[in-house]
Amino acid sequence: MIFRQVFGTGFALLRRCFIKYSLQGITLLTVSFIFTETIIMKTSITLFSLLLFFNTGIFAQANQTQLAVIKKNADAFYIPAATIKKFNFKATTGSPGRKAYENLANPKLIVLDDYRWEAASRDEALSWYNDKLNMLEYLGGNDKDITNKMSSPVGVDAWNVYEMNDEAKKMGEIMGLKQSAYSFTFIVDRYVAKIYIQVDAVATLKEAWDLAKEGLKATLSASGKTSLAAQVK
């Protein structure tokens, strides 16, 4: 439980706070927080022991068959450039399957990470999406599942919404960052998507969805479901 809280919290805060691991070993980059020497020492010892355990346990069991990155007409599946411009986002360095943006003009919507993956079939996409380890590593992490706060939009074969967990919010406040984040994950046919939006403390779920829904519309249209895309609200 301690490991899951630390892992989920570190992953959700800022890109410069991250944990990267592999079957060959673990590289851990952490941000130190000023508490007390006793707490820091106990936490470090606990984390080190847990990391050694999980390196040969859960990490070794993690799904190694990551879905493919979309190659054909890939850009059409992501939030359109016109929407990115409308919300004043600027592109930053992304990664395979992920388009990354930051926003210095709008204090409410701060960071946008737009992910897409492609499976061989709808069934494979659903199986991958519903795998608990994939959910932890790629989709919801240790964030709160708030799917029941929104109606499922049209055209999706699977749908979840996550909010930054309370521990991450508290750690952000210690750093002077009163922020939250929402992740919208879904499947359209054989395509899996995650749209992560980091927001300030007062931004609403609706404001985040007003941006994220453009990604769903794009994915539906690129999948040949233009009529459903027009129905997304």
Image (cartoon, helix red, strand yellow):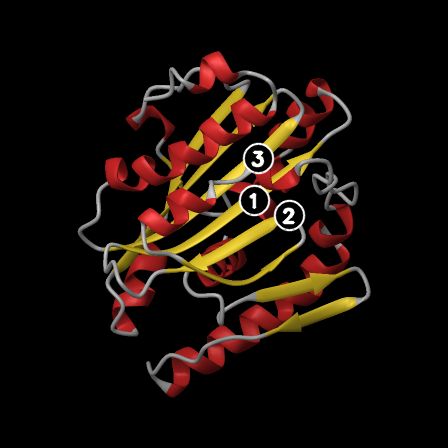
| Pair 2/3: label in front | 3
Q: CA distance from mark 2 to mark 3?
A: 11 Å
Q: Is residue 208 visible?
A: yes
Mark 1 surroundings: few (<14), some (14-19) or many (≥20) residues within 10 A: many
**84 vs 21: above or below:** above
Between 2 and 103, the residue placed more toward the observer is 103
Q: Is residue 143 visible?
A: no
User: Which labelled disc corresponds to residue 98?
Assistant: none
x, y percentage for residue 150? 31, 25
First reached walking from the N terminus: tag 2 or tag 3: 3
First reached walking from the N terminus: tag 1 or tag 3: 3
Between 72 and 42, the residue placed more toward the observer is 72
Residue at image position (33%, 36%) is 209
Name the residue beneath numbered marker 3.
Answer: 77
Q: CA distance from mark 1 to mark 3?
A: 9 Å
Labelled pair 1, 2 in contact (Cβ < 8 Å)? yes
Between 183 and 74, the residue placed more toward the observer is 74
The three-letter code of the residue at mark 2 reads: Gly
The three-letter code of the residue at mark 1 reads: Tyr
- Which element is circle 3 on? helix
Name the residue beneath numbered marker 2.
Answer: 97
x, y percentage for residue 144? 38, 41
Mark 2 surroundings: few (<14), some (14-19) or many (≥20) residues within 10 A: some
